[in-house]
Amino acid sequence: MARAKKRGVAKRGQDNRAKTAAKKIAKQAKPIELYYWPTPNGFKISIMLEECGLTYVLKPVNISKGEQFKPDFLKIAPNNRMPAIVDPQGPGRRPISIFESGAILQYLGRKTGKFYPSEERARVEVDQWLFWQMGGLGPMAGQLNHFKHYARETLDYAIKRYDDEVNRLYGVMNTRLKDRPFLAGKYSIADMACVGWANLWQRQGQDIEQFPNLKRWLETVKARPAVKRGMELGMELRKGIDMKDPNVQSVLFNQRARLA
């Protein structure tokens, strides 16, 4: 009778441990929330999540409707720009929200140990090309796109200024890729940061044939299955949106400070 009672206690103990383990697994499986719109900046994070095989849930932020200004989103991204993420399993197993695509890429790289090396010299190689994109390729290509396609008046000086700068930056990439397959040697978050912008070379009015090393790199990166999935994410959300609609442009452009 005593042995039967002990077996019952042991079994309950095993059941409780199993339930605890199951709850722990379920807690670990909580998906990362991706606040996103299908743009070159959004692609950076969707690609990284796909490359790392992380579970995530899409939280569309329709920038054409001004959803980036909603109070709940501003708690996550105070600069009212996507992408942003909320990781329920952040440091110390506590939730963390992160805005700015470069910071998100670095965080996910540290979290997973993928595409962002831990050795300092290799990490510097990645960081400098990541920040090159953040401070150069993205902003310059974005301004060129604006003045070529969305400005209400044609400003030849502005178009030429940004056209020349994007062309120069493409030349920098082309030279860098002359003797290595990827920007930092090995495929990394630096490549993920650049691919969405370089993919718009035709819209930017650039001739990709002038940059054979860049062309080879672009084709190689875009052929990766995770990159394809990341760059296709949410594309259907953009259907029917007229970027030249004055109401849409009033939301996207010429915004000034919104004081609390």
Image (cartoon, grey):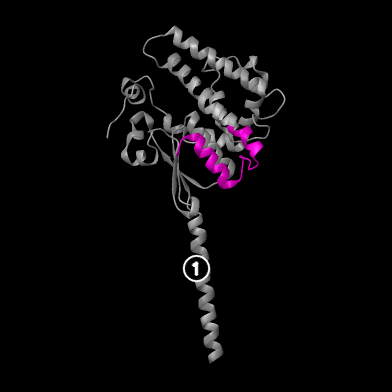
Q: Quadrant of the C terminus?
A: top left
Q: Looking at this rendering, what residue extends furthest in the front direction?
A: 120
Question: Does 71 appear above or below 137?
Answer: below
Q: Nearer the viewer, residue 34 or 113?
A: 113
Residue 126 in magenta stretch: yes
Q: Looking at this rendering, what residue extends furthest in the right direction?
A: 179
Q: Nearer the viewer, residue 51 or 124?
A: 124
Residue 232 in the image, given as x and y percentages of width and height:
52, 34
Give the image quarter of residue 61: top left
Residue 14 in the image, given as x and y percentages of width and height:
54, 74
Q: Identify the main secondary structure in magenta.
A: helix
Q: Secondary structure at mark 1?
A: helix
Residue 149 shows in the view? yes
* Residue where numbered disc 1 is placed: 19
Give the image quarter of residue 187: top right
Residue 186 in the image, given as x and y percentages of width and height:
67, 35
Which residue lies at the image location 47% right of the left edge and 11% below the top edge?
Answer: 159
Residue 103 in magenta stretch: yes
| Left or right, 78 with reference to 55 | left
| Left or right, 65 with reference to 82 | left
Question: Does 159 appear above or below 241?
Answer: above
Residue 199 shows in the view? no
Label 1 neighbour load within 10 Å: few <14, some 14-19, many 20+: few
Q: Looking at this rendering, what residue extends furthest in the left direction?
A: 260
**Amino acid bearing label 1:** Lys
Q: Nearer the viewer, residue 25 or 133?
A: 133
| Magenta highlight range | 99-127
